[in-house]
Image: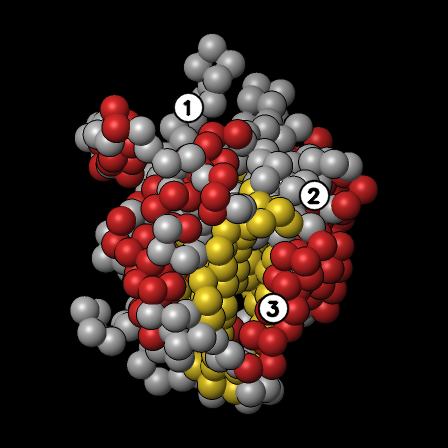
Amino acid sequence: MRGYPESPFPWRAGNRVALLENGEEFFARAYAAIDAASSEVLIESFILFEDKIGKELHRHLVDAAARGVRVEVTVDGYGSPHFSDGFLASLVDAGVRLRIFDPHPRWLGVRLHMFRRMHRKLLVADGRVALVGGINFSADHVLDFGPEAKQDYAVEIEGPVVADVHGFMREALDTRGTGESWQPPRIASTMPHVGKAGVMFVPRDNHRRQDSIEREYRRAIRSARREVLIANAYFFPGYGFLRELRHAARRGVKVSLIFQGEPDMQVALAAARTLYAYLVDAGVHIHEYCERPFHGKVALVDDGWATVGSSNLDPLSLSLNLEANVFIRDPEFVAELRSHMYNLLEHHCQAVDPATVPRSRFWEGTTRPLVFHCLRRFPDWAGWLPAHTPKMALAKPPTADSPGSLLQ
């Protein structure tokens, strides 16, 4: 594609991909994969809470370890800030290896160090099946949580690309959770083809792959002929990304965006709304999902391209956090994802009327661009803070002298 070199990440043919909606579907498949494992379970999650979901996961992990399965779990120290002694001890005593990515103590009860977090959500069982998406191990991803339950998506994958996800996760265990030294093999694994989907696994880090996920999005948008549909919880990309959307709409592509209308963080909606006029003036259709918080990170282009993963389209995900998406070429999967998205559009979203979008008054002509650039440059300014190498803490059994301790 003009303006971009060929992607360094290989497409793997012959995969089966199943769309999973919300925690009800995701957790059932995650637990089934863990229960069926005979040799190894690898999990990465930004959030693991000690709620009903965390306790259920705990039970499945302990059972797997008791069968002799090697169980490796990595969670983020900011997203998963606390575990009780009993929760930790029973995991570790069973043989589960629980790592905390870059943990830091609270300062006056406040969690700091919110930048460069491990935001991935990955699971691989026996190197055979992988789950990739945006769903954390927490109760707010199931509908009975109430009006704050999150709408979200993941995929279950079988086939050759699972070897890439598995290799990356194994490498991340040896590189303080970053996975920065992982390189996808040039030759696909010998795993049998089990489906028709081409799948590409793309991680993002703060070294050689700083814009890897954004590039794949922009490459697809630039090639769109009929439709671009993006549903993303936190949307505040740079001008380059926004220009791709405007150019697509102006050349006749139907560009539809789904954002949070009832966000879990009001700043997310406020930031996205500052972009509405710039987008709708080019013919982009914007919709706000108003049933409950939207946490998904999915997109489709035309009839043959889709993505599902952990990456939002905001400065934290695109410039700071460790993320992972899969990109999918499969008309059947794209049709299924489109059906889900159109159901949201028709029954659970409010369309933004271009006539009601506020336009800048003359004294705001410089203010809005200034605010935009300040927010967009925030990750760069965060990079001026004293740099540190992320640490990985390994949970060990609590003792009388150090209850609930973590071994650095």
Residue at the far front: name it.
Answer: 355
Q: How crowded is mark 1: few (under 14 residues within 10 Å), some or many (20 or more)?
A: few
* Amino acid type shown at disc 3: Leu
Q: Mark 2 points at which residue?
A: 291
Closer to the observer: label 1 or label 3?
Answer: 3
In the figure, residue 102 lies in which quadrant?
Answer: top left
Residue under pointer 1: 112
Is 83 placed left or right of 105 in the picture?
right
- Mark 2 to mark 3: distance in Å? 19 Å
Return the disc, 2 or 1, that comes first in the chain's sequence: 1
Q: Is residue 118 above or below residue 180?
A: above
Query: What is the C-alpha distance between the residues marked 1 and 3?
Result: 37 Å
Please tell me whether mark 2 sits on a helix, a strand or a loop. Answer: loop
| Residue at 51% across, 79% down | 303
Q: Are marks 1 and 3 in contact (CB under 8 Å)?
A: no
Q: Where is residue 37 in the image (x, y as percent from the top left)?
A: 67, 67
- The colour scheme applied to this rendered structure is secondary structure
- 3D distance between C-alphas at marks 2 and 1: 31 Å
Above or below, 308 relative to 384: below
Q: Which of 2 and 50 is in front in this view?
A: 2
Q: Which amino acid does label 2 sit on?
A: Glu
**Residue 44 placed where, x, y %?**
52, 51
x 63%, y 57%: residue? 345
Q: Could you classify mark 3 by the number of other residues whose Cα lies within 10 Å: few (under 14), some (14-19), or many (20 or more)?
A: many
Considering the numbered disc 1 on the image, is that residue within a helix, a strand or a loop? loop
